[in-house]
């Protein structure tokens, strides 16, 4: 899934109900100068609408990477992850769970649902930027830092 910066921008979907956490992600991606386009939705239902390209997201791009909060309104992150991995069209999109929970049960459940990685939201902005950049560099090594 390497994406060359000369071929196109990496599409990232952030599923996050906290406006401050969504802003932090925007800043983390801007600070790390990663070649991407960030799309944000605020709940699990909206995430599935975006991913299935239903109105009003008919022309939404297919994400190359999803950052998914576990604790979401309307449809939990666990339910979104289960739906994604059960869908033949969506199951290969890497999903990085990004949540405040560090409970072993939550981590085990996320990996049982085929999450690609699990990150606990750090309190420090620099740590957050570093974590986001590490995930991005792992999935898109050729486009990192361009």
Image (tube, rainbow, N blue to C red):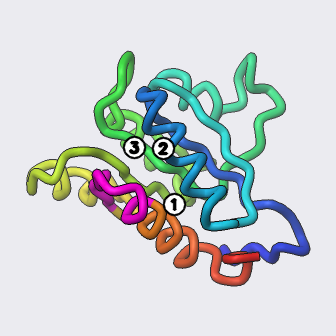
Residue at image point 52% right, 48% down? 25
Left or right relative to 72: residue 111: left
Tell me, yes or no, whether the two marked residues, 3 and 2, touch with CB atoms within 8 Å. Answer: yes
Q: Residue furthest right?
A: 6
Displayed quadrant of residue 104: bottom left
Mark 3 and mark 2: span between their CA atoms? 5 Å
Q: Which residues are magenta?
A: 118-128
| Magenta span contains residue 119 | yes
Residue 59: % across, % down: 83, 32
Residue 77: % across, % down: 35, 36
Q: SS of the residue at dot 3?
A: helix
| Magenta span contains residue 32 | no
- How packed mark 3 is, by other alpha carbons closer than 10 Å (few <14, some 14-19, many 20 or more), is many
Residue on which the image places disc 3: 81
Residue at image point 43% right, 38% down? 21
| Frontmost residue, 45 versus 82 | 45
Residue on which the image places disc 1: 94
- How packed mark 2 is, by other alpha carbons closer than 10 Å (few <14, some 14-19, many 20 or more), is many
Asked if 65 appears above or below 46 in the picture, the reply is: below
| Frontmost residue, 88 versus 62 | 62
Mark 2 and mark 1: span between their CA atoms? 10 Å
Residue at image point 24% right, 57% down? 112
Q: SS of the residue at dot 1?
A: loop
Residue at image point 89% right, 71% down? 7
Left or right relative to 99: residue 32: right
Mark 1 and mark 3: span between their CA atoms? 10 Å
Residue on which the image places disc 2: 84
| Frontmost residue, 127 versus 70 | 127
Left or right relative to 103: residue 30: right
Residue 146: % across, % down: 77, 76
């Amino acid at each position: 899934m390497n994406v060359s910066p000369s071929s196109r921008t990496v599409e990232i979907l952030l599923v996050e109900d906290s406006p401050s956490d969504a802003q932090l992600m925007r800043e983390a991606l801007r600070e790390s100068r990663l070649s991407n386009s960030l799309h944000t939705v605020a709940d699990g239902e909206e995430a599935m609408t975006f991913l299935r390209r239903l109105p009003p997201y008919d022309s939404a791009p297919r994400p190359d990477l999803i950052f998914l909060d576990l604790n979401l309104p309307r449809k939990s992150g666990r339910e979104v992850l289960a739906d994604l991995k059960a869908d033949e069209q969506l199951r290969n999109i890497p999903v990085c769970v990004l949540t405040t929970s560090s409970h072993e049960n939550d981590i085990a459940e996320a990996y049982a649902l085929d999450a690609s990685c699990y990150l606990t939201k750090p309190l420090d902005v620099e740590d957050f930027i570093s974590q986001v950049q590490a995930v991005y560099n792992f999935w898109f090594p050729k486009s990192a830092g361009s």
